[in-house]
Image: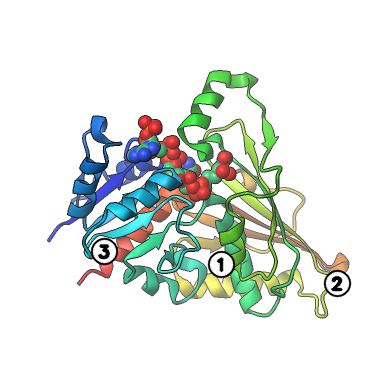
Amino acid sequence: MTAKIFIDGEHGTTGLQIRTRLAERRDIEVISIPPEKRKDADARAEFLNAADIAILCLPDDAARESVSLIENNTTRVIDASTAHRVSDGWTYGFAEMDKTQTDAIRSAGRVANPGCWPQGPIAFLRPLIKAGLLPDSLPVTVNGISGYSGGGRTMIEDYEAKGEDAPEFMPYALTLKHKHVPELQAYSRLSGAPLMQPAVGNFAQGMLTALPLQLGHLDRVPTGAELHAALAGHYGSVGGVVRVAPLGDMERTGGLDPESHNDTNDMTLYVFANDARAQALLIAVYDNLGKGASGAAVQNMDLMLEGRD
Ligand SMILES: NC(=O)C1=CN([C@@H]2O[C@H](COP(=O)(O)OP(=O)(O)OC[C@H]3O[C@@H](n4cnc5c(N)ncnc54)[C@H](OP(=O)(O)O)[C@@H]3O)[C@@H](O)[C@H]2O)C=CC1
Ligand SMILES: CC(=O)N[C@@H](CCC(=O)OP(=O)(O)O)C(=O)O
């Protein structure tokens, strides 16, 4: 039977992107709530309970409300918000992070779609810690830049109103309490909280995340080639959409254009290193609305459909 998909928040930034990605699909039926009823809890409950998979593209509180409105045990959920990413009973929707994660998503009833910022750092840290090349106690700082669509409708309207007067590069999360720190720590398997220093740029879409690593204090310092080989081995064996670029020995590269992966679900991991100084720099490039949000949601939906009885 054709699976019924309900996108709660279909008219927002993430929801619209998912709608577009599903537009040509004939193997599923997207059931859409009339726009004027999109905040009517009774109407949402009806659609949520009629769906085989509900994809929540809502603010956190509304996402929690949607889950509470589901009264059956047949509607499966993908939540794109931050509400359930480290909650019991939820499967983290980053398929490539472990060999077992794809199967876990296939059979899950509740999938938390990852935040855009943590995905790059987790893509590096989880396999490297697992391989024993980095300790879980490593002090980690993440920086990077995202297009303004990462802030949803309000930020998009704000940047588009300012046009060229909007700041080109604006660091934020200055309280050092960014909402993605808990999932980044949990799924990287770090023992301490990473320090996140995100920034938003005056471009709509696309992002990169960077992990500069000082490794000189480690008992055993991994070389850049070892870090690269471990990542290439991991992503070569898990399948999926994460690709490892050849080991970088260059002053600069156009591959690090944060907009270069726009409208795809791809992620490319770059490793740069100065072994003599025991330093490495790990950079991930992806689309905040692709692998960072809507692309990952569709990837997770497809895995869940494969896992249907
Ligand atoms: N943009 C991005 O890059 C990413 C976003 N996310 C997450 O996805 C979720 C959606 O974000 P995004 O699409 O950017 O946000 P938007 O603000 O663009 O869209 C949110 C949508 O939800 C609707 N909405 C708000 N409150 C309610 C409610 N109580 N009941 C029903 N609908 C409601 C909004 O309607 P209205 O506009 O009329 O208020 C809007 O259509 C958020 O949790 C966000 O953090 C995750 C990863 C990346
Ligand atoms: C540029 C910008 O503001 N980006 C958003 C993150 C978008 C995102 O991933 O939000 P979720 O946690 O809902 O997944 C921020 O840093 O708050």
In front: mark 1 or mark 3? Answer: 1
- Ligand 1 position by quadrant: top left
The residue singled out by tag 3 in the image is: 305
For the residues labelled 1 and 2, the Cα–Cα distance comes to 24 Å
Amino acid marked by disc 1 = Tyr
Horizontal arrangement in the rendering, residue 244 relative to residue 227 (left or right)? left
Q: Position of residue 255 (x, y in %)?
A: 62, 48
**Mark number displayed over residue 135:** none
The residue singled out by tag 2 in the image is 217
Q: Where is mark 1, residue-wise?
A: 187
Residue shown at 23% from the left, 69% from the top: 308
Residue 34 lies left or right of residue 174; in this view the side is: left
* Upstream in sequence: badge 3 or badge 2: 2
Quarter in which the C terminus is drawn:
bottom left
301 with respect to 268 (left or right)? left
**Residue found farthest to the left:** 1
